[in-house]
Amino acid sequence: MITKHDLNPNLLRAEYAVRGPIVQRAQKLEAQGRKIIYCNIGNPQALKQKPLTYFRQVLALLEYPELLKKPEIATTFPRDLVERAKKILELHPHGTGAYSQSPGVPFIRQAVADFIARRDGIPADQDHIVLTDGASKGAQAVLTALIRGNGHGFMIPIPQYPLYSATIALFGGRQIGYFLDEERRWQLDEHILNESIERARREGTRPVGIVVINPGNPTGAVLSLENVRMVIGFARRNGLSIIADEVYQENVYDKGEQFYSFARVMHEMGERTVPLFSLHSVSKGFLGECGHRGGYLEFRNIPQDVLGEFIKLQSISLCANLVGQFATYLMVAPPEPGDESYPVFQKEKSAVLSSLKRKAEILGEGIQKIEGMHLDIPRGAMYAFVRFELPPERGVVISEMAPEERRAYEAKRDTEYCMALLEQTGICVVPGSGFGQKAGTLHFRTTFLPPQDEIEDFVTQLRTFHEQYVRELEEV
């Protein structure tokens, strides 16, 4: 019989906390009849966010074109969406049930290029765009191509989305963590970047790339223009490629903040040597279409023969799923003013984004009032990385621990806290140790995706739980 010892050791080393043991326990409790508030993963429609009408109407017509022949469609679907579905099927007559070209349907790739050009005011080339099964597959493609051996490493933010640490481990690479500056609203610090890369080199690692998530997961931070410029300069000086994970670009809530794409800033800087791999997805933003697994990967500053190897890599999987490709098209080419479907689209889009903004405020303002907890109001994305304090345990002298021992101890503490929170309140969050955190700090990551009344309940229950948990520790 096969055992774990027979498996690829890289798989055993990979960890993915977002769906880890706390979530598994939450699912068991839910099966027993407990109400669970799932705040562990950015899965909007699983948390009662409604799909946008135009999106589902067009996909319905594409999945079942026979509907277009029925006269009642003209009175139940907006005229522009019916015409759009017909046009899509003219451009791709094979529909959703056949493979496309490996990099994706050509007119959809062109629509993505047009979207980038509109967004940033810069040229974009459809031949440098590959449609992917969500942004995750795009990230994994880049890591597959650039990690050439176990001595190669990728710089990733700490805290980070564990897709990156898990994939790097799976492909036999090395993780080079760089801490985000919590005191400066989770911006990047050039001094920390320099320290991290030099330490990695001393340890025998060859850095080949850097991942930047903007807006941030799990932090909810939005990077400043100066920060983006700094990272590009750092990558140039150190011969690094950049993976720009920009799937939350629509999720910016603070009026004083703005999303700056790496492609735009790189173009404005005249940078032509740093390879850039930009990711976007239908899963986030205001769509929340996680299940359709649509996204794209854009390439800049890479030669044609390298691009060919990426196309070959995509060809090994044949192509991205077709419904996801059409979903990506609908994301980058939404209804426009004057279209019959536009008023409903705009109303639904605004409702989603304004609701997220309000829930971020409720979460931030509520947690700020809990003694021993710290959180700025999230400015972007869908998450908050909440710092909390616990009294020291008697007989435990942290200063005498080795670094690995201390990390294990602090991971045990934040995991026990999150498990107790789940058991006592039904609130499911992820321990900060699953994302990485500075020594001497404890965090958990939460989304603010559940309905507003559940976020309000979350804050109320969290206060009661935290105060009781701390009292019990102090009494031991």
Image (tube, rainbow, N blue to C red):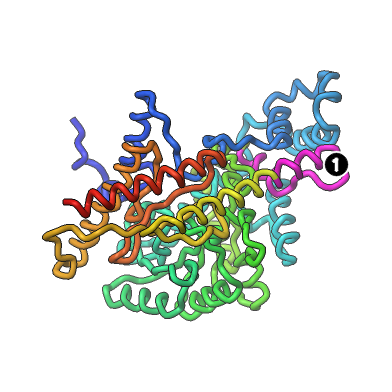
Q: Position of residue 288 (x, y in %)?
A: 59, 42
**Which residue sits at x=49%, y=67%?**
185
Q: Position of residue 452 (x, y in %)?
A: 56, 41
Front residue (pair 471, 190): 471
What residue sits right under mark 1 in the picture? 339
Give me the residue at 31% from left, 76% from top: 199
Q: Is residue 10 above or below residue 342?
A: below
Residue 314 located left or right of residue 114: left
- Report the span colored magenta: 324-350
Q: Is residue 442 visible?
A: yes
Query: What is the residue that sits farthest to the right in this orientation?
Result: 338
* Residue 180 among those drawn in magenta: no
Residue at x-position 81% and y-position 41% = 343
Query: How many numbered marks does the figure carry?
Result: 1
Q: Residue at x 76, y 37 (%)?
A: 88
Q: Is residue 451 above or below residue 408?
A: above
Q: Is residue 473 above or below residue 153?
A: above
How far from the left and from the top, in percent, is residue 94?
69, 31
Quadrant location of the N terminus in the rendered image: top left
